[in-house]
């Protein structure tokens, strides 16, 4: 799954220039890795992103194990991830730190091209191996990604049309059976 997402991102990339559109980072961090603490940790090990842990489980044996951190991508985009890990259920919330993104990139820097949106939707469809439902409103676009034992909601909130994401977040739920 990570390979397919990476392939689509590579095809749509802008030849090594730091991208101002957060959608590639959302795919890499929130969609491809947000359903598992192991995947998030492997991303740190491989240098895909860095993490500043805000809270971690006090007692690894107590359930639910909860934690949160700020993940920084090579593009400079920062994401907050919070999670709860139960015996048979895992949930996470991954959100772009849009305050920092706007402070660093400015309003013009948070634009996404039509190709980037198309690549994002294609990657969601290919990664899902099941069903992707899309709903478009004036306030943004929502995707429901359903896989066996996993449900993911991807929200692209906008204020000035689909190419201007104001905020992006992903909520993931995984049944571990």
Image: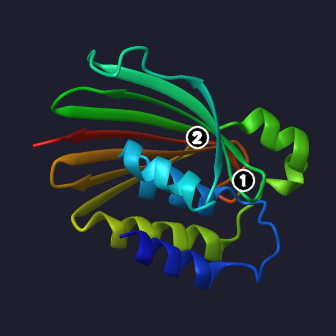
Rendering coords of residue 21 (x, y %): 72, 60
Q: Secondary structure at mark 2?
A: loop
Between 102 and 30, the residue placed more toward the observer is 30
Task: Give the left or right position of residue 143, taking residue 82 as reference.
Answer: left
The quarter of the picture where residue 16 lies is bottom right
Above or below, comparing residue 145 to residue 58 in the picture: below
Q: Mark 2 or 1, which is nearer the eye?
A: 1
Q: Is residue 166 visible?
A: yes
Q: Which mark is residue 177?
A: none
Residue, disc 2: 139
- Residue 11, percent from left and from top: 59, 85
User: Where residue 40 sits: x, y (%)?
Assistant: 47, 48
Seen in the image, is 123 located left or right of residue 140?
Answer: left
Question: Looking at the figure, which quarter contains the C terminus?
Answer: top left
Q: Is residue 45 left or right of residue 61?
A: right
Q: Where does the N terminus fall, quadrant-wise?
A: bottom left
Q: Is residue 78 above or below residue 117?
A: above
Q: Would residue 122 be visible to someone looking at this image?
A: no
Q: CA distance from mark 2 to mark 1?
A: 11 Å
Q: Residue 37 at what x, y percent from top left?
A: 40, 42
Q: Residues within 10 Å of mark 1 (few under 14, many from 20)?
A: many
Residue in view at x 57 percent, y 62 percent? 46
Front residue (pair 19, 52): 52
> In the rendering, which numbered label is found on residue 164?
1
Instruction: Say which residue appears at 24% left-offset and 26% top-offset.
Output: 86
Q: Residue at x 41, y 64 (%)?
A: 124
């Amino acid at each position: 799954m990570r390979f397919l997402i990476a392939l689509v991102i590579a095809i749509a990339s802008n030849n090594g220039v730091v991208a101002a559109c957060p959608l590639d980072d959302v795919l890499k961090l929130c969609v491809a890795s947000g359903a598992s603490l192991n995947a998030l940790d492997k991303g740190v090990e491989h240098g895909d992103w860095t993490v500043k842990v805000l809270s971690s489980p006090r007692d690894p044996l107590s359930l639910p194990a909860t934690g949160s951190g700020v993940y920084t991508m090579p593009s400079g985009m920062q994401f907050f991830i919070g999670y709860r890990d139960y015996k048979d259920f895992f949930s996470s919330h991954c959100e772009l730190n849009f305050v920092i993104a706007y402070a660093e990139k400015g309003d013009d820097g948070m634009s996404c091209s039509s190709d980037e949106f198309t690549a994002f939707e294609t990657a969601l469809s290919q990664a899902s191996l099941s069903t992707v439902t899309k709903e478009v409103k004036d306030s943004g676009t929502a995707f429901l990604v359903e896989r066996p034992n996993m449900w993911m909601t991807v929200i692209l909130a906008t204020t000035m049309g689909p190419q201007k994401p104001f905020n992006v977040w992903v909520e993931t739920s995984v049944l571990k059976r």
